Amino acid sequence: MNAGQDRLPSGREPFRPAWALAGVGLLVVCLLLRSWPSLTRPGLFVEDAVLFSHYYGHTRPVSDIFASHIGQRYLTVVADFFAWAWAWADVRWQPWLYQWTGLVLAVASVATVSFSGLVRNRVLLLVCPLALGLTGLNHLYYYNTLIYTMYTGVLMLLALLFYPPPQSVRSFVVQALLLALLPWSGPYSLLALPAALFLFVCTANRTRRVLLAVTVLSTLAYFATVSGSTVQLVNLLRPWILVQYLQTVFDKIFFFDFTRHLPMWYGFLLLLAIAAVSWLLRRDREYLLQAAVMLGLVFASILLFFLSVKLGQYITTSDCHRVVASFFWMLFLVVTVDRLLGDRPLHSPWPLVCAGLLLTLVVFDNRRHPHKGWVPPVSGLAAYLETIRFYEQQGLGEKKQAVCLQLPSGRPMQPRVLVGYRGADARLLLPMDAEIVRGRRFVCRRYTFNEERL
């Protein structure tokens, strides 16, 4: 499903899959070196704790993935499906499975770009995954949580929109399935709707139009499941929101949040520079279309937050609200450099100079923002999981007994499960009961889940 040897604009190198694969492999190595302490200690971070609690005990039907369990109006079907599937595994392995799933899908989102043919210079094919994976993905949670597949799945979806028409039936089927499934990752798949419609109008290839139509229909189907309106268009009429919107794009995206509150004219100067580069590459219609979509995703993804009902809750953007913009801004920079370099020989110094500048940016960015490579571990998780496993083996169901176990992690979202009998006549074991011989600090004094009632 790579770009293959499709027709190239004048002056472009052929696509080399081996270099793209080497770049993704280099990303994995650098990621492990950067984040080994966090990647070897899964933590059921953020909403992973909610998914773990909800699907624990593999008592839910698979249809349950089409309901929201994280307190939002939208679905996260991809994350819920994996949480449902991993609930069948040994409870002690489930946090690892959550983390490995997030890691694989995050790397896959970067690899999707690498194999798209957007970048063809051999040196940049090595550097592009590092730029996207270590800076574009602006928090470690994309690699060590399951719930953040709601973002990496969308990134993969949007990257697939740039793929050339498939040359085989197998490639067509794979792309069609991915474009149909990935909109169900999360709400930012809304961005695929205008992007796909724009590309549909701009392309004459029937095969590609079919794939873009699949994207549009699946995205519309996903948003038909959203309960209630999540958009407040009235925000467009509030000047302070528009100023904050532009400040966010300029400060936190264009200038990578390196400084605080740059004068806004810096951002407009950068836009003039982009216009100048576009004029230099004005004969490359393919690049102009791709650049328009990438920059459109940068501005539109931030705008979604400022039009969202979440604005009143968060006031300012979090890393997850900026990830699409961060990812595609970095991709825009790499693709633009690739186009400006053209078909230069491998021994030319300019690709190495550009690659060195990109790597310097990545290193400085990671030093400036340590949360991209490390998060505080969740203490007590291993003991908590062992406690769950212990009471699973005590035959509580046969005794019509149950015990509620919660990890007191001090975080807003904590895993909490019910082990044993789930009937209305169950006896809930309390910390002082004689049957509680292990893990008293995890035992709840009452069971208050809304989904079930003892």
Image: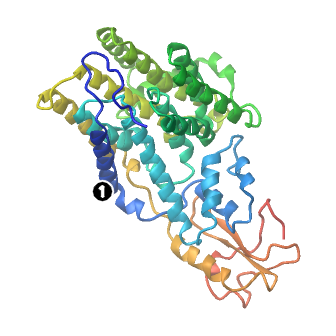
Horizontal and vertical percent position of residue 334: 32, 29
Given residues 156 and 322, the one toward you in this image is 156
Question: Relative to residue 409, is residue 440 depicted above or below?
Answer: below
Question: Relative to residue 369, is residue 337 depicted above or below?
Answer: above
Q: Secondary structure at mark 1?
A: helix
Horizontal and vertical percent position of residue 112: 43, 38
Residue at (64, 36) in percent of width and height: 310
Q: Is residue 317 visible?
A: no
Question: Relative to residue 413, is residue 365 depicted above or below?
Answer: above
Residue at (17, 33) in percent of width and height: 352
On-image quarter of the N terminus: top left
* Quarter where residue 255 is shown: top left
Residue at (65, 34) in percent of width and height: 312
Is residue 385 left or right of 325 when viewed as pictured?
right
Q: Is residue 316 visible?
A: yes
* Quarter where residue 280 is shown: top left
Given residues 119 and 42, the one toward you in this image is 119
Is residue 393 left or right of 332 when viewed as pictured?
right
Q: Which residue is mark 1?
A: 33
Colour scheme in use = rainbow
* Quarter where residue 428 is shown: bottom right
On-image quarter of the C terminus: bottom right
